[in-house]
Amino acid sequence: MRGRHITTGITLVVLLAILAVGAVIGAKTLFAPIDNNKSTPSPTCTPKTVKKGQRIHPHQVQVSVFNAGSHAGLAQRTMSKLAKRGFRRGEVGNAPSSTHVKRAQVWTRLHHDPAATLVARQLGKGTAVEVKHVNLGPGVDVVIGDGFRTLAKAPKAVVAQRSSSVCTPVRSTSTPSS
């Protein structure tokens, strides 16, 4: 009987030690100073005014691609093909679950966006350019559905039909390591 009391006492002491360590760590975390100097992510593109008649090329356009279909990897494959054509990479992911797109749509927040027109032409005739008040990723948003197969033959530049604004990619200030 005496051995059982000793085991119970040791168990109680170990549990109290664990509780004390947890309380100390919790108190340190709770009362730690808040770091208000967290860096905010830098913008990946900046608005640039485009005059009527000015040519817009793929290297001036950042594109984000989102999958609204059920085929896994479709957004990533599409982004790779657009990048091979010179477009700057934005984000890749799934479109919001409420999004229904049969083939492809280009979403932009700017009316008469020549960058969105250039991207839409890459996706084929009849690809709609929709002005949306939602921004899924940096640059022009491409939303693709199960009906999308591959990029179309398309011009390498478009001419702005009127003065507008284009979100051009920010050049990296870091130097590549050799």
Image (tube, grey):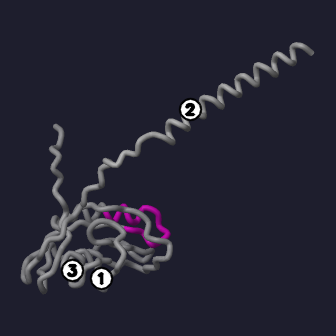
Quarter-of-image position of residue 21: top right
Residue position for label 3: 113
Which part of the image, by quadrant, shows the C terminus?
Answer: top left
Residue type highlighted by circle 2: Val
Outermost residue toward the top in this view: 2
Crowding at mark 3 (Cα within 10 Å: few <14, some 14-19, many 20+) = many
Marks 2 & 3, CB-CB < 8 Å contact: no
Return the x and y of residue 87 as percentages of the image width and height: 22, 65
Magenta stretch, residue numbers: 66-79
User: Circle 2 is placed at which residue position?
Assistant: 24
- Image height of 42 relative to 54, above or below: above
Q: What residue type is labelled 3?
A: Asp
Badge 1 or badge 2: first in the primary sequence? 2
- The reply to whether callout 3 and callout 1 are in contact (CB within 8 Å) is yes
Q: Residue 129 carries which label?
A: 1
Which residue is rendered at x = 55% and y = 38% of the image? 26
Residue at the image position 11 percent from the left and 80 percent from the top: 159
Q: Distance between the residues labelled 2 and 3?
A: 57 Å
Q: What element carries label 1?
A: strand
| Residue type beneath disc 1 | Val
Determine whether, in the image, residue 52 is placed left or right of residue 28: left
Mark nearest the camera among 2 and 3 is 2
Q: Dot 2 surroundings within 10 Å: few (below 14), some, or many (20 or more)?
A: few
Q: Image height check: is 16 above or below 147?
A: above
Residue 153 seen anywhere in this rendered image of the structure = no
